[in-house]
């Protein structure tokens, strides 16, 4: 386990308490935990996390060591849907010998720990773990090839099966990504404004409030969290208390973002779509 605190005295007290209850061994400053390598530059007050060794093992495990690297997490032409699941006996037999779930699980662990850049791609391929087809497997291998090369947004109606949109977010502290996710929205959005508004609420504000509280516990209090969105209409809807005819159908649970913005804990700002791409 790793202990984090702003006080060395508190760390030593906790170590003593654990030592009285369990058989423990102090390994000193953490250098590696759960396949994550930790490197520190104390003079610059910087800390780096890496899964280089883990990713190399994953690439070798799934036979992609000699594959040609690619520069995008997922190719634009790889439009996946449930219709690409196997239907013939031959295809089902072929996929039965493909370690699809294991590969997706390995990618998911890398995504959760250090590789925020593959979040959207992993979100897509993980939807077909129940019955993957050859096209789905090709997409997984593409992500593996990408790994060799070593803000809030939404994708309107990107799910080809149920037409649900995708929420994506990334939070940064001092330029370093600390929290990220890509996920299908719970309901079908009827417009790009609604999709972006749902992304701001579910993906942006809720995570921002949690991180804001965590930083406060660690002694780094922020007066306000800046949340960037590339939809001017969604920002206007979040700041305007008037219910319009075209948006009155939006579920009430998404409107709590208005109270948060009004209280001043979150500042919702406009950013150009190209700016989001540069940040990510």
Image: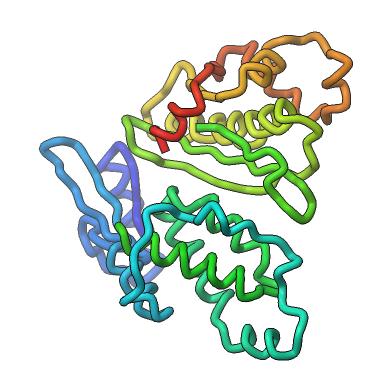
- Image side of residue 223 versus residue 93, left or right: left
The relative height of residue 109 versus residue 195 in the rendered view (above or below) is below
Please state which of residues 135 and 143 is positioned toward the viewer in this rendering.
135
Q: Residue at x 30, y 47 (%)?
A: 11
Q: Position of residue 248 (x, y in %)?
A: 87, 21
Residue 19 shows up from this direction: no
Q: Position of residue 41 (x, y in %)?
A: 15, 44
Q: Measuring 27% from the left and 62% from the top, which residue is drawn there?
A: 32
Residue displayed at 34% across by 46% down: 4
Q: Is residue 49 left or right of residue 208?
A: left
Residue shown at the point (77%, 30%) measured from the top left: 191
Q: Residue 234 is drawn in which quadrant? A: top right
Q: Quadrant of the C terminus?
A: top left
Would you identify the image quadrant in which residue 82 lies? bottom right
Q: From this viewpoint, which residue is outermost toward the left?
A: 43
Q: Give the side of residue 17 with respect to residue 45, left or right.
A: right
Q: Position of residue 166 (x, y in %)?
A: 65, 43
In this rendering, does residue 2 appear at all? yes
Determine which quarter of the picture holds residue 173: top left
């Amino acid at each position: 386990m790793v202990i984090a605190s702003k006080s060395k005295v508190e760390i030593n007290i906790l170590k003593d308490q654990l030592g009285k209850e369990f058989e423990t061994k102090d390994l000193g400053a953490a250098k590696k935990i759960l396949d994550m390598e930790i490197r520190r530059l104390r003079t610059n007050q910087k800390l780096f996390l890496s899964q280089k060794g883990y990713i190399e093992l994953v690439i070798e495990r799934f036979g992609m060591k000699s594959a040609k690297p690619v520069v995008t997490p997922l190719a634009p032409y790889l439009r996946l849907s449930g219709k690409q699941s196997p239907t013939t006996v031959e295809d089902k037999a072929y996929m039965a010998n493909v370690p699809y779930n294991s590969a997706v699980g390995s990618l998911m662990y890398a995504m959760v720990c250090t590789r925020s850049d593959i979040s959207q791609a992993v979100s897509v391929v993980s939807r077909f773990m129940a019955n993957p087809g050859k096209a789905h497997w090709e997409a997984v291998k593409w992500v593996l090839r990408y790994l060799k090369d070593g803000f809030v947004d939404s994708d309107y109606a990107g799910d080809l099966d149920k037409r649900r949109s995708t929420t994506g977010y990334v939070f940064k502290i001092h330029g370093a990504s600390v929290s990220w996710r890509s996920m299908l929205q719970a309901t079908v959005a009827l417009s790009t404004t609604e999709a972006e508004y749902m992304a701001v609420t579910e993906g942006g504000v809720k995570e921002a409030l949690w991180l804001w509280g965590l930083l406060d516990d660690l002694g780094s209090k922020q007066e306000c969290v800046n949340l960037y969105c590339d939809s001017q209409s969604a920002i206007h809807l979040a700041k305007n208390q008037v219910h319009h005819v075209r948006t009155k159908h939006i579920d009430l649970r998404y409107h709590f973002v208005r109270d948060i913005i009004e209280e001043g804990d979150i500042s919702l700002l406009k950013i150009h779509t190209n700016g989001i791409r540069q940040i990510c």
